[in-house]
């Protein structure tokens, strides 16, 4: 079946088997930032934005995104410049192995658009489905709090 | 040549602690690529024409493979090959990636006619697509002779227990006929006599679980012949050089092993997992082969932490002098003896020297085979298991003495300038080395840590209020820095005419940031910035040998190799500058990427190498240095924790945890902090949630992230890390290791805090809510 959708602003028209998951389709299209972590919707490494909302691409049928817009982490750095959340993650030492980071960036970005001033608890709640085995989460929470503070013009 | 003399000519003295690059939190050099989601992991490499490799795994815990009928699978269009034990070399090896010859027994085959756990490999399938490979798996018919199994390691040595390793080729195992992979015992002094003289003693048995590494990137490898027919393996490994050596042992073939970025390992990738399967397919078909494990395979068919049981006896006199430690252990190595002996020894060698004032010590036990997933290396490498028993026992002893556990543990712990006989007696798989402790700030860790944590004030508080109980615990830990006299690391530095350097290291950055901190070390010694270093790590055809990323060795061993190489490069630069300018080396020094002379002349590194390329005494400046340590300087840590128990459910939350760490100079404080925070979090997982459960047939019930719980963001409340002011004289710019030690304390500190809160001494990790609830209920503490 033919499915048409945008990824990071670019239109794609692909033929997929019914039952194909978006994770596979995106990786086949070259969006390798979208990761296989568990394939059971429990780690968050495959998170992408679907019309701005974070979804788990490992359990999203490609057929359902026909006519919709997907954003992956490849769409976050414009002309090589990092977005604020990406920059904060690097600065706070929140990128260790980096495998969970693409999923974290798209989810944290969605959080900050929904709630520009999240509390620490709100961050932990919203991102509870994004597992990270390296950092113990502390540096990632610091990074997200920092972006929120900076965007409010406060000194971090 | 006298290295020390040369060093003073070339660079600023390292011990003055006036660092420019070291001890600063420069950004991780691979951070940009990772945060942009660049295709840098094994699964991101598209090698054209690759076959997809899948493994047919045993549904039985213990069985003889009577017959494999692959005819139906081979009839399926798109199936390239199905390999069984008849198609691969029958060479016994160990998957453990350790220095050669390995202390682990050779008890493993790529495929065997016997399977020893549910998930053991039976056949290798290669097909044109994932879907065809999956279909082919289902079409293979295997006849098994199912044997009796052993799932519970406490019954591995029972009289009528089935023998798991009866193959004739096995070597290096202690007593396989009784399922004993390894055995170890040491003692000094007479523990029974000392115990009888003690005023206060404690005896208890402690259990730690078979934790999964649960690194976010599953195991993965791709193999292919390059244009010149050289076998090349891209693999998510911590030990590329050991992989190359083991592949040669099995298949007799030379190879190039490339380590791209690694999505976490924690010891789980200190072994050959996938490499042998893809190699077998590439050798058979001549085609590229890729095998990416599923999460389930990573959970069920790679490695776990060795579950251990320790019966411990400790005793002190009435003046609170600890006099004796006796630890009798049992460790579960699962189906194969990977890291069996060495993890067990580390449970003693990285805990016992901390309390060096005792008169008698005994440490002994067996490491047994069972029909469960093979255990292997896992961050801490036995030390968290040993520390749980030892620190909890000492906590209890302090309680019996009516003494603050901080005071008791500190009073009896090791100090700078002291030694412990254990250092010499216990190494890894063999004798250790004598060493005098050159840096130990455990007093600062304990005393300043207690102040920061408000330890004394908190202990005055009410413990039970309403439906919540609060408790406060402390735990002490040490680790090592490298395996002395065994593990070697090399570093090559090449200068370029644009003023940059290539730093080529076999050291294997698996997410730790070692590429960054090694560049910092090189930049410090060469008086330039990290940005001038282009780092290539772990390509066995390009980079010099390094033992790999394990045993808390990269900062220390690879760091010392890098520092040596950078210092030699500094001398080469000074020599070249002296030749160019005609001024003697003594009148020259390095500063900010230039050679400056006392007469005021200056030459940039770029100018020097450009002249050396094209116009003057032409040569490439390039140096390689190696380092192997004679000692393994321990880092130290004291952890304080506050826990909250929900008396209605038994749920434990770690409300705050303070880790006060002596790791010498933190080369990059931000990355060092991340190592401790991450290890603490994994330790909290081990202490409260993580354990694999098997049904009676040996099937792992906890094979995904729903059934096997790793700490999620909401579970981690507050982890604080503080570094002591410390300088290790033998370390690169004063550094010791920091990657593993954080895992040693969460188990004991949480258990000690629970005792403080409700008076219940928990002796088994993980501390599950329901278990604690029933104990609370027995004592009438539930509402």
Image (cartoon, helix red, strand yellow):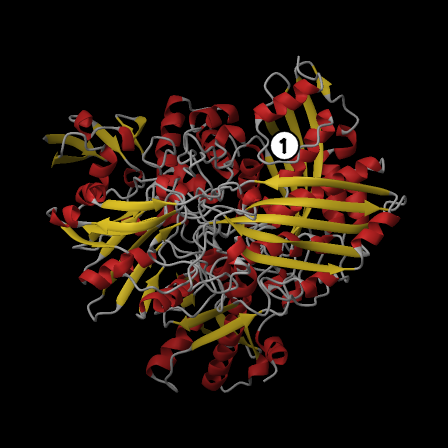
Q: Count up the numbered dots.
A: 1
The residue at the point 80 percent across, 50 percent down is B412
User: Furthest residue to the front?
Assistant: B160
The residue at the point 73 percent across, 55 percent down is B362
Residue B40 visible from this viewpoint? no
Q: In which quarter of the image is the N terminus of chain B?
A: bottom right
The residue at the point 70 percent across, 49 percent down is B327
Residue B527 screen position, x and y as percent: 52, 66
Residue B215 screen position, x and y as percent: 43, 44
Rendering quarter of residue B584: bottom right
Residue position marked by numbered label 1 in the rendering: B656
Q: In this view, does B533 lie above or below B642?
A: below
The answer to whether residue B376 is left or right of residue B609 is right
Residue B675 screen position, x and y as percent: 54, 47
Q: Is residue B147 above or below residue B518?
A: above
Residue A13 visible from this viewpoint? yes
The answer to whether residue B194 is left or right of residue B154 is right
Near-viewer residue (B500 or B65): B65
């Amino acid at each position: 079946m033919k499915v048409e959708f945008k990824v990071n602003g670019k239109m794609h028209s692909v033929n997929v088997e019914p039952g194909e998951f978006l994770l596979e389709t995106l990786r086949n299209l070259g969006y390798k930032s979208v990761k296989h972590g568990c394939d059971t919707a429990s780690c968050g490494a495959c998170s992408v934005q679907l019309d701005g909302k974070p979804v788990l691409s490992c359990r999203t049928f490609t057929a359902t995104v026909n006519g919709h817009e997907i954003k992956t982490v490849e769409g976050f750095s414009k002309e090589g410049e990092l977005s604020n959340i990406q920059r904060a993650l690097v600065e706070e030492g929140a990128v260790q192995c980096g495998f969970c980071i693409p999923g974290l960036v798209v989810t944290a970005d969605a959080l900050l658009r929904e709630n520009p001033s999240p509390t620490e608890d709100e961050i932990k709640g919203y991102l509870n489905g994004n597992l990270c085995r390296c950092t113990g989460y502390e540096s990632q929470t610091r990074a997200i709090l920092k972006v929120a503070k900076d965007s409010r013009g406060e000194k971090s | 040549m006298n290295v020390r003399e040369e060093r003073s000519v070339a660079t600023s003295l390292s011990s003055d602690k006036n660092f420019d690059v070291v001890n600063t939190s420069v950004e991780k050099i691979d951070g940009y690529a990772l945060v942009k989601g660049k295709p840098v992991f094994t699964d991101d490499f598209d090698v054209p024409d690759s076959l997809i490799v899948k493994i047919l795994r045993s549904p039985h815990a213990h069985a003889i493979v009577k017959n494999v009928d692959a005819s139906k699978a081979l009839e399926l269009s798109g199936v390239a090959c199905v390999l069984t034990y008849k198609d691969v070399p029958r060479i016994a090896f160990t998957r453990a990636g350790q220095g050669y010859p390995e202390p682990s027994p050779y008890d493993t085959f790529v495929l065997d006619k016997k399977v020893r756990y549910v998930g053991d490999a039976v056949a290798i399938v290669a097909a044109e697509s994932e879907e065809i490979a999956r279909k082919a798996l289902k079409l293979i018919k295997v006849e098994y002779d199912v044997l009796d199994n052993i799932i519970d390691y406490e019954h591995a040595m029972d009289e009528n227990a089935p023998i798991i390793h009866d193959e004739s080729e096995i070597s290096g195992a202690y007593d396989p006929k009784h399922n004993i992979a390894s055995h170890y015992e040491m003692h000094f002094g007479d523990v029974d006599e000392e115990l009888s003289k003690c005023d206060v003693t404690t005896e208890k048995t402690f259990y730690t679980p078979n934790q999964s590494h649960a690194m976010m990137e599953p195991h993965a490898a791709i193999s292919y012949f390059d244009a010149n027919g050289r076998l090349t393996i891209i693999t998510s490994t911590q030990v590329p050089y050991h992989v190359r050596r083991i592949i040669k042992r099995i298949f007799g073939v030379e190879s190039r092993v490339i380590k791209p970025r690694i999505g976490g390992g924690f010891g789980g990738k200190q072994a050959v997992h996938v490499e042998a399967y893809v190699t077998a397919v590439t050798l058979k078909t001549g085609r590229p082969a890729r095998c990416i494990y599923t999460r389930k395979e990573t959970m069920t068919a790679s490695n776990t932490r060795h579950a251990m049981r320790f019966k411990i006896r400790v005793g002190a006199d009435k003046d609170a002098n600890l006099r004796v430690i006796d630890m009798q252990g049992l460790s579960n190595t699962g189906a194969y003896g990977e890291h069996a002996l060495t993890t067990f020894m580390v449970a003693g060698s990285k805990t016992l020297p901390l309390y060096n004032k005792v008169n008698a010590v005994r440490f002994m036990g067996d490491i047994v085979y069972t029909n469960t997933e093979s255990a292997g290396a896992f961050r801490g490498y036995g030390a968290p298991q040993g520390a749980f028993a030892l620190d909890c026992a000492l906590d209890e002893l302090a309680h019996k003495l009516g003494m603050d556990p901080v005071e008791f543990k500190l009073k009896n712990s090791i100090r700078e300038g002291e030694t412990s006989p254990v250092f010499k007696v216990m190494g890894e798989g063999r004798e250790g080395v004598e060493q005098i402790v050159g840096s130990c700030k455990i007093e600062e860790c304990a005393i300043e840590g207690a102040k920061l944590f408000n330890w004394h004030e908190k202990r005055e508080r009410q413990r039970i209020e309403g439906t919540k109980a609060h408790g406060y615990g402390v735990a002490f830990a040490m680790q090592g820095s490298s395996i002395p006299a065994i593990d070697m690391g090399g570093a090559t530095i090449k200068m370029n005419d644009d003023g940059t350097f290539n730093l080529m290291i076999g050291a294997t950055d698996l997410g730790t940031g070692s590429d960054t901190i090694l560049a910092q070390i090189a930049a410090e010694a060469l008086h330039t910035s990290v940005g001038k270093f282009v780092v290539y790590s772990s390509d066995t055809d390009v980079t010099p040998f390094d033992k790999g990323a394990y045993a808390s060795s990269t900062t220390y061993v690879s760091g010392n190799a890098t520092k040596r190489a950078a210092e030699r490069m500094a001398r080469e630069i000074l020599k070249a500058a002296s030749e160019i300018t005609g001024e003697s080396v003594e009148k020259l020094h390095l500063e900010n990427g230039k050679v400056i002379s006392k007469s005021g002349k200056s030459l940039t590194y770029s100018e020097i190498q450009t002249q050396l390329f094209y116009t003057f005494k032409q040569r490439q400046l390039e140096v390689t240095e190696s380092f192997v340590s004679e000692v393994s300087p321990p880092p130290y840590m004291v952890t304080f924790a506050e826990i909250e128990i929900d008396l209605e459910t038994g749920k434990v939350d770690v409300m705050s945890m303070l880790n006060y760490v002596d790791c010498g100079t933190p080369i990059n404080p931000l990355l060092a902090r991340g190592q401790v925070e991450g290890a603490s979090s994994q330790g909290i997982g081990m202490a409260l949630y993580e354990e694999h459960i098997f049904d009676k047939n040996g099937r792992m019930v906890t094979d995904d992230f729903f059934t096997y719980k790793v700490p999620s963001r909401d579970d981690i409340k507050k982890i604080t890390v503080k570094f002591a002011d410390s300088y290790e004289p033998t370390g690169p710019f004063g550094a010791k290791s920091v990657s593993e030690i954080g895992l040693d304390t969460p188990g004991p500190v949480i258990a000690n805090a629970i005792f403080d809160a409700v008076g219940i001494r928990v002796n088994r990790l993980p501390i599950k809510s329901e278990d604690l609830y029933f104990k609370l209920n027995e004592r009438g503490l539930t509402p």
